[in-house]
Amino acid sequence: MKICLFWHRRDLRIHDNAGLAAALASGLPVVPLFIYDQDILDHLPNKADARLTYIFDEVERLAAATEAAGGTFLARYGKPVEVLEKLVQEFEVAAVHTNEDYEPYATQRDAEVGTMLQKHGVKFLLYKDQVVFAKSEILTKAGTVPKVFGAYHKAYLAKLTDEMLLPYGSAEAFTKAHFQQLEPAQAGPRPTLASLGFERLEQYVPTADLPAEAVVRTYDSTRNIPALQNGSTRISVQALWHPQCAAGDAPGQGPELEAALRNHVA
């Protein structure tokens, strides 16, 4: 049976996930996937790494949620292009869905993955997810990229619409009917921190909840004073791995608070 893979990367969430929503709506059964990237992990100097501990816990949370919904979650360790090539050889993969990533390493990796998948006749579909506007979507009246923040901020707010802040329907479609359940032998074991060669190092991370209203309303005057207990949102980790945790939940919070959130996100 043909399936599609949804490749989790900088989007370790079910809610408001553009690529996951598209995969679940594709008509093909979905198998979610996370790859522990060897090209990144091999360069981490400390084998007790709080960042990897956090990512590992989030991946395991996603795996548990997928299994509870009736699906199978794959996790692999290796070089992404090699892992994906092996998967398309093991399974009848029609497409790989994932969200765009814009860092230099990521764009090079995705170009290599796209070339490999094309060779195997597999579609590689990328979606804008972690940002509201990407690439050349915000330009000056002269058609150039803004060089100062003020010009960017003004163009951003002028182009922003309410519809852009509505969540994608990934959570609602996260049901058994949209997944492919693999046999345990097919799925294989997920890596552990030990098998990756790392140890747990836990640090406190706030939840991905919307910041308190009081924090948002005074954010412009308190965000640069780290000594204040409620001076900032303290969701920098969540903003990296759950980038929709603030902007995507803004609608419905009241017009004044929504406006404040939009200004801070911009």
Image (tube, grey):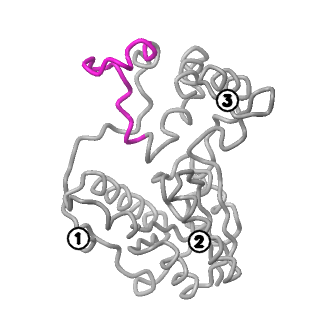
Residue that badge 1 annotates: 197
Q: Nearer the viewer, mark 3 or mark 2?
A: 3
**Amino acid type indicated by mark 1:** Gly
Write down the residue under mark 2: 113
Mark drawn on residue 148: none
**Amino acid identity at mark 3:** Pro
Q: Would you say 72 lies left or right of 173 here? A: left
In whole angstroms, how far apart are the C-alphas of marks 1 and 3? Answer: 44 Å
Query: The magenta stretch spans which residues?
Result: 218-238
* Magenta-drawn stretch contains 237: yes
Furthest residue to the right? Answer: 142
Q: CA distance from mark 3 to mark 2?
A: 31 Å
Q: Counting residues from the N terminus, which is met first, the one under dot 2 or under dot 1?
A: 2
Q: Is residue 42 left or right of residue 163?
A: left
Along the viewing direction, whichever of 118 and 169 lies nearer the viewer? 118
Q: Residue, x 54% and y 18% (percent of image)?
A: 260
Q: Amino acid at mark 2?
A: Val
Spatial CA distance of label 2 from label 1 is 26 Å
Sort mark 1 into few (<14), some (14-19) or many (20+) by Cα contacts within 10 Å.
few
